Image: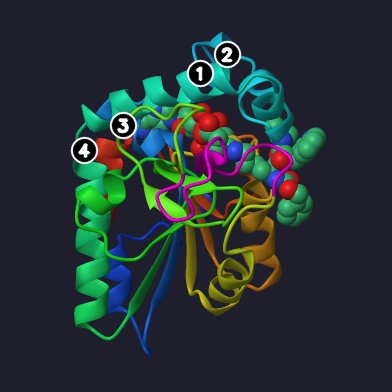
Amino acid sequence: RIEARPTVARHCHGASERLGKRAMSRHIFVLTGAGVSAESGLGTFRDKAGEGIWAKFDPMKLATPQAFARDPQTVLAFYDARRRNLLAARPNPAHVALARLERELAAKGDRLTLVTQNIDDLHERAGSKEVVHMHGELLKARCQSCEAAHAWLNDLTVGDACPRCDRVGALRPDIVWFGEFPHHLHEIDRALRDADLFVAIGTSGAVYPAAGFVAEARAFGVPTCEINLEAADNALLFDDALYGPATEIVPAWVE
Ligand code: BV8
C-alpha cells in the first residue's frame, strides 16, 4: 500500500477536513470506476494480474454497437449474466461513505457531483440520490425505435417487445458501448469547471473521455486526488493520491 506522496499530500485531505477549512461553499466532483464496486464482487475490466473482465471477454466482440448488430444473442447473454450478478451483489462501505458525503455536503449547502463509469446501481442502493451514469445502466433497456428507456431486471431477449411502442426486436441494453457517445458530457463539463476538488476513485484511467477528466480539472485549476488500489494509467496527472482498497480508503477519506 503506497501512502500518499508527502510532497503533495495537501489535496487528498479528508472531505470533512476540507469542509472545516471552507471559506465558501464547497463542490466536490467524484468520478468512480469499476474499482469502487470490486469488493461487492462485480469484477473489474483491467487489472495488473490480467484477471479483468476484458481479459476473459473481448470488448470489441461484446461492448460495441457492431457486435450487437452482428450477434445480439451473445451480447445480451453477456449482459444478462452481469445483471444477475449485480442483483445478487450488495453495496460496500465505499458506496455507503459516498452516499453519506452527499448528505453531509448538502446539509451544509455544499455539493457533491458523483459521476460513475459503472453501469451498476450500487451507488443508488447505498443511498446516493444524484448519480450521473455516463456509460448507462445495466438495469435499463432502451428501445431503438421510440428511444424510451425502461427499468429492466430480467434477462433481455431479442424477441422482447418495447413496453411503450410494442415494437419487437428493438430493445437493447441502455449502456454506452465503445464508439458511442457517453451521456451527460455537457453537465459533466460544467460541474468540472465549478468544482473545488476532483477525486477519481477505482478507475484505471484507460477509457476516454472519462480518463481525460483529470486533465480538464487541472486545466480549470481544480486540485485533483486519485483514490485507487494501484496507480492508474493517468496517475501522474493527479496532485495527490491515496492507495488501498476502496472499502478502507473511501470511508476514511470521507471522515
Ligand atoms: C467515445 C460500458 C466518441 C460497457 C464502457 C476506437 C473506436 C471507437 C472509440 C475509440 C477507439 N479507440 C479509442 C476510443 C475511445 C474509447 C476508449 O477510450 N477506448 C480505450 C480502450 C482506449 N472510448 C469510447 O469509445 C467512448 N466513446 O469515445 O465516443 C467521443 C469522443 C470524444 C468525446 C466524447 C465521445 C465510450 C467508452 C465507454 C465504453 N463503455 N462501459 C460495459 O460496462 O460493459 S467502458 C468500460 O471501461 C467499463 O464500463 C468501465 O466503466 C470503463 C473504465 O474502466 P474502469 O472503470 O476504470 O475499470 P478498470 O477495470 O479499467 O479499472 C479498475 C480500477 O480499479 C483499477 O485501477 C484497479 O486498480 C482499481 N481497483 C481494483 N480493485 C479495487 C480498485 N480500487 C479500489 N479498491 C479496490 N478493491
Q: In the image, what residue type sits under mark 2?
A: Phe
Q: Magenta part of the protein: which range?
A: 162-180
Report the residue at 50% width, 24% height from top.
Answer: 76
On residue 57, the disc is 2
How far is disc 2 from disc 3 in space, using C-alphas? 22 Å
Q: Is residue 111 left or right of residue 94?
A: right
How far is disc 2 from disc 4 in space, using C-alphas? 26 Å
167 inside magenta stretch: yes
- Camera sees residue 2: no
Q: Name the residue carrying label 3.
A: 154
74 inside magenta stretch: no
How far is disc 3 from disc 4 in space, using C-alphas? 23 Å
Instruction: Point out the tag, 2 or 4, that comes first from the N-terminus.
Output: 2
User: Which mark is nearer the camera, 3 or 4?
Assistant: 3
Q: Is residue 175 left or right of residue 13?
A: right
Ligand 1's quadrant is top right
In the image, the residue with mark 1 has its CB under 8 Å from the nearest atom of ligand 1:
yes
How far is disc 2 from disc 1 in space, using C-alphas? 6 Å
Q: Name the residue carrying label 1.
A: 53
